[in-house]
Amino acid sequence: MPAAEFVVVANRLPVDRIIGPGGEEEWRTSPGGLVAALEPMMRHAHGAWVGWPGQAGLELEPLEINGIDLIPIALSAEEIADYYEGFANDTIWPLYHDVIAPPQYHREWWDAYVRVNRRFAEAAAAAAAPEGTVWVHDYQLQLVPQMVRELRPDVTIGYFHHIPFPAHGLYAQLPWRDQVLTGLLGADVIGFQRAQDATYFLQAVRRRLKYEVKGSAVTVPDGDGGSRTAVARAFPISIDTAPYLELAARPEVQARAAEIRASLGNPSKILLGVDRLDYTKGIRHRIKAYGELLEDGRLDVEDVTFVQVASPSRERVDAYVHLRDEIELAVGRINGDHDTMGHTAIRYLHQGYPREEMVALYLAADVMLVTALRDGMNLVAKEYVATRADNRGVLVLSEFTGAADELRQAVRVNPHDIAGLKDAIMTAVEMPGAEQSKRMRSLRRRVLENDVDAWSSSFLAALAEVRGR
Ligand code: GDG
């Protein structure tokens, strides 16, 4: 495989391996926004993508799909347990989401994280063309930037952090806090979702490593008496809006939205939640507030239905097993107390759906509830807004999401404040049409202008600027 001008490094490859009925191997591109954002540029610049193919023990040769070289990284079942489910999802994930669940600190998980990060870095270093660009993604790979730099000082390195970065008081818990900062500072540009995340990162760098920080620039000593500059700042991610606009305009998707309403008994208002089943998403808080509104008689199941799609996630991590039990207990209680033969209080769906169905749900929903306790961005909020070409519908949005920095015309909530959340839900349910469209127009302008292309272009422009120095 020839050397690649542009190398993306992410935990997962952007494809899923499907084994057909006759045992034949097939690859299907996963519909993530990241692939959509990077694909055109990767084809143009001869791109390679380094990532795990998604199955334990699968050792594959590099392959080319749609003009992109895919470089699979094999992970054993034990490495998945320690590096991915362990350190990434049970240490870093809860710590960086403000310790909503207690982070577990295990030295053998850290050792696996270092080992696996090195494997990704070596593959990226081997794939990159002289003076090429390497763009590393997310919290599973925080050590990769510095590892790539040591192997390939000639390449330009970017890193984008999709989840929040915590305040120093929390970050300081991490037993490997200095190593992780050093790993990230191997990048020329370190991108975060919110300005606040970048500020917390820069504070940690100043306090722990004592490097000089001026504005968004860090002076990173190179060990030989010299130094270089790394830039850390916000680049809020967005969605690829085109497929959402296109699906929302399709007559059959609109007909499906009407069918969904009818199958719920044509309630006057449908509330919707769409999340991975994750403790960061505030699903319990949302259910509690809704249950109390029914209890108080402020909402009635004859008029209102709440649909919660909770797509299965990280099912082998204990905290997720408990969360599922708690949510299902709460849903069962509320439905038991309030359902009638013809109407259900909460239609709870622990399933994943094709994108068409998600868009039909967005179109069917009068109120979208995004009540995350902490969320890097929250793309669901942006997807809902993108699909509402009729300018109807209300977004209830937690102020603890990255999206809240941009989507100022949403009904903002602090999900910890159940009384406030109840009032916000009522505001949304009762909002007059004219007010809905005034707000939705402004939300849509924002999402349509700042799409995922704008995001990747601005990140790459910042990388090019650093390189030009
Ligand atoms: C991380 C950060 C940041 C969900 N269920 C189904 C489905 N989805 C899709 C949604 C959306 C995506 O998954 C979820 O994105 P979010 O942004 O809401 O949340 P995370 O998964 O936690 O993502 C987050 C993001 O990275 C990007 O930087 O915004 O803060 O935590 O696109 O629509 N899609 C389909 N079926 C489902 O059942 N088709």
Image (cartoon, grey):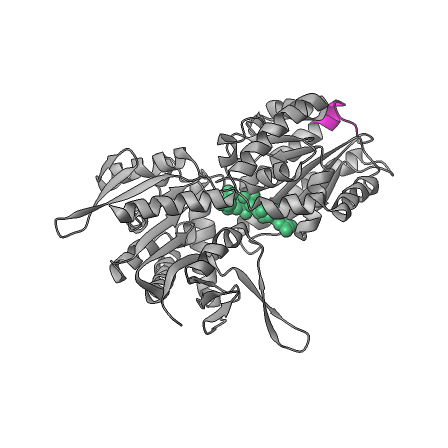
* Residue located farthest toward the bottom when viewing the structure as drawn: 22
Q: Is 357 located above or below residue 376 in the figure?
A: below
Residue 446 or residue 403, whichever sits in front: 446
Residue at point 52% right, 63% down?
Answer: 54
Residue at point 29% right, 57% down?
Answer: 155
Q: Which residues are magenta?
A: 293-300
Q: Quadrant of the C terminus?
A: top left
- Picture coordinates of residue 145, whole percent (x, y): 32, 54
Residue 362 is drawn in which quadrant? top right
Residue at point 18% right, 51% down?
Answer: 222
Q: Is residue 373 left or right of residue 295?
A: left
* In magenta stretch: residue 123: no
* Residue located farthest toward the left when viewing the structure as drawn: 225
Residue 445 visible within the image? yes
Residue 22 is drawn in which quadrant? bottom right
Q: Is 390 located above or below residue 460 in the figure?
A: above
* In magenta stretch: residue 296: yes
